[in-house]
């Protein structure tokens, strides 16, 4: 299908919409972090996707919500005797987190339907956007699956489910950032294969590190072994302490020492790889945008490592922990942009949508 220059669809509203959704997702990740740090995530014991959007409106409704919280182990073992006002504090954190999820759903779906009705989205772009929507719907179910793990036998949610919930949210965020990058001018071509490989590995390891960070948070592992560079008496703890549980693989996910050690070692690995990637970009004489992307990524990885050390040494106070989480989102964003920039294989027009050739007639 040919378009004249005057008929070419304007992609700028699509970009503005996706940027707004990405910002909302980043905000939700931070609110989720605050909800965890304040032990608020189990304060709402029901999942009501529609009617749950309304908070308690009178004393009777507040008491009903409070009685529901009193029925779970967290209240009995950690917060017995909590006042109604104290309950309201944790309730508002969790309610805000869930409300933001509903806002994101509406902010994504309604404009998406409008753009579909208006036309002008390429077939590949539509597939990507439908895929992101499907992952967003799955995320709502995963969120309740996570909360449900702490309502009967535990006083906190499962660290496995917490990590899954966080990584899925950030995977959706990364998908939007990748798509946004595809809607801009194409990346320079001809980058050396080694540079492309290190960008992809950096992105993959960033996701692994995010998962390990969520395990650390879920296990409260940031509040113990608060020394650096040593941990449990040495740079590398004793194997008997790292793998005391059976089967051995459970230590990788459930042993607080092992999980924190993994998180530290991968942080060092990411820093070294970011340095090598920046050196490779400088030596390759590629387009300036590639070198700038590598240097920015190295700088933010360095900042993130520094914040991680400070958070650990101070036993994960909320301000430092949330700053650490926020900068992790920046690291992910830069890693996605760099990987997309270096893996583009051909010049793609942006007006018609991703992967859709367009002919401009004079």
Image (cartoon, grey):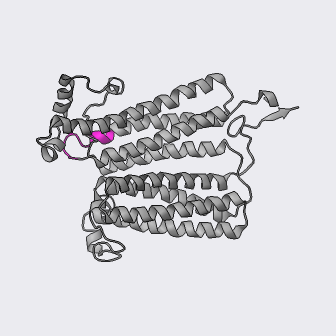
Residue 74 placement (x, y as % from top left): 18, 44
Residue lying farthest left? 81
Pick the quarter of the image with the N terminus.
Answer: top right
Residue 293 highlighted magenta (yes or no): no
Q: In the image, residue 121 lies at what x, y percent?
A: 66, 31
Q: Position of residue 119 (x, y in %)?
A: 67, 25
Q: Residue furthest bottom?
A: 234
The quarter of the image holding the C terminus is top right
Q: Residue at x 31, y 74 (%)?
A: 237
Q: Is residue 152 magenta?
A: yes
Identify the residue at image location x=37%, y=39%: 142
Q: In the rendered view, does 273 fall on the left or right side of 306?
A: right
Would you identify the image quadrant in which residue 264 lies? bottom left
Residue range corresponding to the magenta coloring: 145-155
Classify residue 187 as left or right of residue 266: right
Q: Is residue 247 visible?
A: no
Taking the spot 22% from the left edge, 40% from the top edge, the residue there is 151
Residue 53 placement: quadrant: top left
Image point 73% across, 66% down: which residue? 285
Count every numbered label the image shows and give the total.
0
Mark yes or no: residue 354 visible: yes
**In the orientation shown, which residue stands out farthest toward the right?**
362
> Magenta stretch: dominant SS?
loop
Q: Position of residue 124 (x, y in %)?
A: 65, 37
């Amino acid at each position: 299908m040919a378009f004249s220059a005057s008929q070419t669809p304007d992609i700028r509203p699509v970009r503005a919409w996706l940027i707004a959704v990405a910002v909302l997702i980043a905000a939700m990740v931070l609110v989720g972090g605050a909800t965890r740090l304040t032990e608020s995530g189990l304060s709402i014991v029901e999942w009501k996707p529609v009617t749950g959007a309304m908070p308690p409106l009178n004393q009777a409704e507040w008491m009903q919500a409070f009685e529901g919280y009193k029925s779970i182990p967290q209240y009995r073992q950690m917060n017995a005797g909590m006042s109604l006002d104290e309950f309201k504090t944790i309730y508002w954190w969790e309610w805000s987190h869930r409300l933001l999820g509903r806002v994101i759903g509406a902010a994504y779906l309604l404009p998406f339907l409008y753009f579909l009705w208006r036309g002008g989205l390429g077939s590949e772009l539509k597939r990507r956007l439908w895929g992101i929507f499907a992952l967003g719907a799955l995320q709502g179910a995963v969120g309740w699956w996570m909360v449900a793990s702490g309502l009967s036998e535990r006083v906190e949610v499962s660290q496995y489910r917490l990590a899954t919930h966080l990584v899925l949210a950030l995977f959706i965020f990364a998908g939007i950032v990748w798509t946004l990058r595809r809607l801009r001018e194409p990346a320079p071509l001809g980058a050396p294969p080694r540079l492309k490989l290190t960008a992809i590995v950096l992105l993959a390891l960033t996701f692994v590190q995010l998962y390990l960070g969520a395990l650390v948070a879920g296990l409260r592992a940031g509040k113990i072994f608060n020394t650096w560079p040593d941990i449990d008496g040495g740079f590398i703890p004793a194997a008997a302490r790292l793998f005391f549980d059976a089967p051995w693989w459970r230590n990788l996910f459930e042993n607080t020492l092992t999980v924190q050690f993994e998180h530290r070692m991968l942080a060092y690995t990411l820093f070294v790889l970011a340095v090598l990637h920046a050196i490779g970009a400088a030596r390759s004489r590629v387009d300036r945008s590639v070198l700038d992307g590598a240097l920015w990524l190295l700088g933010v990885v360095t900042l993130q490592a520094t914040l991680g050390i400070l958070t650990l040494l101070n036993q994960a106070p909320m301000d430092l922990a949330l700053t650490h989480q926020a900068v992790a989102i920046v690291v992910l964003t830069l890693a996605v942009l760099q990987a997309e920039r270096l893996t583009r294989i051909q010049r793609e027009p942006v007006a018609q949508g991703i992967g859709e050739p367009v002919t401009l007639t004079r």
